[in-house]
Image (cartoon, rainbow, N blue to C red):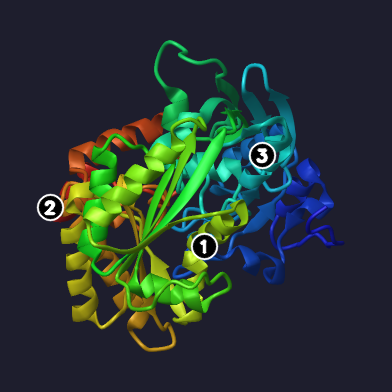
């Protein structure tokens, strides 16, 4: 098992033996050299050391740990694979981390009713791999699907390249088991169209602030008969953007419709999965169409025709499955590929209306020029989910703070055109102040009241998701003082 090692109980912290009594002596980390690995998630700008890390292996152990921490009034944070990009699993005040990576079983698969039941630590891509030989797959596909967990996907309501046609995580959750902030175990959903309030929908995307999900019932889909991938190169971003709009307007709903700009292309071609993109183009479109075999070729022909209408330099269709996989690997590793051209990067995930894409990219370009920081744009063009990657060097004094400021400016642009500050990465600690770009104080207060029903003492993942001061009353009190 992970992290199995002999440890001596710390005499300085009385919670260690209490936690070890619940999960086992070897299943609690408390030494600094062990805890430092948990000081951040995929968002590395902020860091904090947890008080301890606990590894439960069942819902009952999660419940027992939470009950103890609740009784002692000790704050705690659920954590999956640590691939989150908004700091949702980062300790800020010495919280205890409850790691769910050992709860990684595929508990049940029902092909007749098309569902599977998994524990939260089950890795996303492993579900598709486990059922592919039966002709099924799991649709949500974040770029980190090779390592991210389905429990973490539920917490962030993760999306992916295929959410244009198939939706995000919440569209594929049928039921869940969860542990509340006081340790109570609840079951939600289980069959479609359960009457009453959509509590599953409320917990999905709540970023670990309402409950700890310990079992998930997910929808599985039949593998499409046919799938084809198209690559198109454009000399102008505006032409690529117009092609995106016209493809959707033509009634074609691609399984995925992705775009990368010139800086992003430089990064992916310098990294581990180059495919030979021309370096002098401004944009590349990557599109997948799937469904019944009959009619796929007609859709591909129409996509090619639309691209040609908008001055495409070259458009090509993948001739083999292997060629398509190389193209998608090039796109899906784009974030990490930026390390080939920059020491550090900060990724955002604002959302905009598709029709405003040329305008927003122009404004992002202006922010880049004014700040002196390069910005690579990688995005789910079909649903307007942008991923501006702000390239910087943390070794240069002040450049990290500048990158954070630039990221906030980019999100403000997205909000100003009627979009949102996040499409799939979540708010965490990274964007909680930017929540004011899209919500009034009264709207934030309404959400806080919901949180208080589930997590009244804010012991569960505290100080995440909402801005500080976190209540309208606190804002007014501060102003009065």
Mark 1 lies on a secondary structure that is: loop
Residue occupying the point 51% across, 39% down:
154
Q: Which residue is most to the top?
A: 195
Between the C-alphas of marks 2 and 3, the distance is 54 Å
Residue at screen point 64% across, 67% down: 37
Identify the residue under disc 2.
480
Residue 235, horizontal then vertical, whole percent: 26, 70
For the point 52% across and 57% down, the residue is 328
Vertical order, 393 against 271 (above or below): below
Point out the tag, 1 or 2, that comes first from the N-terminus: 1
Quadrant where the C terminus sits is bottom left
Look at mark 3 in the image and give the residue it sits on: 127
Q: Is residue 392 above or below residue 12?
A: below
Judge depth for marks 1 and 3 and give the one in front.
3
Q: Secondary structure at mark 3?
A: helix
Disc 3 crowd, CA 10 A, few/some/many (<14, 14-19, 20+): many
Residue identifier under label 1: 42
* Mark 2, other Cα within 10 Å: few <14 / some 14–19 / many ≥20: few
Whole-angstrom CA distance, mark 1 to mark 2, is 39 Å
**Farthest residue in the right direction?**
6
Q: Position of residue 2 (x, y in %)?
A: 79, 56
Quick one: label 2 or label 3, which is nearer the N terminus?
3
How many marks overall? 3
Tag nearer the camera, 2 or 3: 3
Query: Is any part of residue 247 visible from this angle?
Result: yes
User: Is 181 or 56 nearer to us in this picture?
Assistant: 56
Q: Secondary structure at mark 2?
A: helix
CB-based contact (under 8 Å), mark 1 and mark 3: no
Q: Residue at x 54, y 37 (%)?
A: 226
In the image, which is nearer the foreground, mark 1 or mark 2? 1
> Which one is nearer the viewer's eye here, 241 or 450?
241
Q: Earlier in the sequence, mark 1 or mark 3?
A: 1
């Amino acid at each position: 098992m992970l992290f199995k090692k002999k440890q001596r109980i710390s005499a300085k912290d009385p919670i260690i033996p209490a936690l070890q009594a619940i999960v086992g002596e070897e299943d609690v980390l408390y030494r600094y050299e062990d805890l430092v690995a948990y000081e951040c998630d995929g968002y590395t700008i902020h860091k904090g050391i947890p008080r301890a890390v606990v590894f439960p292996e069942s819902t009952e152990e999660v419940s027992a740990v939470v009950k103890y921490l609740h009784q002692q009034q000790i704050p705690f944070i659920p954590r999956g694979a640590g691939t989150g990009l908004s700091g949702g699993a980062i300790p800020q005040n010495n919280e205890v981390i409850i790691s769910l990576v050992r709860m990684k079983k595929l508990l049940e698969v029902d092909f007749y009713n098309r569902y599977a039941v998994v524990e939260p630590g089950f890795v996303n891509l492993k579900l598709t791999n486990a059922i592919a030989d039966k002709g099924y797959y799991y649709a949500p596909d974040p770029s980190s699907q090779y390592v991210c967990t389905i429990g973490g996907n539920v917490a962030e309501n993760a999306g992916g390249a295929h959410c244009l046609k198939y939706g995000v995580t919440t569209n594929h959750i049928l039921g869940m088991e969860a542990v509340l902030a006081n340790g109570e175990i609840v079951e939600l959903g289980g069959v479609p169209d359960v009457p009453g309030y959509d509590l599953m929908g409320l917990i999905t995307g709540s970023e670990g602030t309402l409950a700890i999900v310990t079992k998930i019932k997910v929808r599985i889909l039949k593998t499409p008969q046919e799938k084809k991938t198209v690559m198109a190169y454009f000399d102008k971003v505006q032409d690529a953007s117009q092609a995106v709009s016209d493809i959707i307007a033509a009634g074609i709903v691609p399984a995925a419709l992705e775009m990368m700009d010139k800086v992003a292309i430089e990064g992916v071609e310098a990294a581990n999965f180059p495919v030979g993109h021309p370096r002098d183009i401004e944009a590349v479109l990557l599109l997948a169409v799937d469904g019944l075999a009959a009619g796929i070729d007609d859709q591909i022909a129409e996509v090619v025709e639309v691209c040609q209408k908008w001055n495409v330099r070259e458009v090509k269709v993948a001739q083999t499955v292997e060629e398509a996989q190389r193209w998608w690997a090039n796109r899906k590793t784009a974030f990490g590929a930026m390390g080939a051209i920059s020491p550090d990067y900060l990724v955002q995930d604002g959302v905009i209306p598709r029709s405003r894409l040329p305008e927003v990219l122009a404004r992002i370009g202006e922010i880049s020029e004014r700040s002196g920081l390069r910005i690579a744009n990688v995005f789910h063009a079909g649903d307007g989910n942008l991923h501006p990657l702000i390239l910087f060097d943390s070794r240069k004094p002040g450049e990290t703070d500048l990158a954070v400021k630039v990221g906030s400016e980019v999100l403000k642009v997205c909000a100003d055109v009627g979009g949102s500050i996040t499409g799939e990465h979540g708010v965490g600690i990274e964007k909680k102040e930017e929540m004011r770009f899209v919500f009034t104080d009264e709207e934030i207060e309404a959400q806080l009241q919901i949180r208080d029903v589930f997590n009244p003492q804010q012991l569960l993942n505290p100080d995440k998701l909402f801005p500080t001061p976190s209540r309208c009353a606190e804002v007014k009190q501060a102003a009065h003082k």
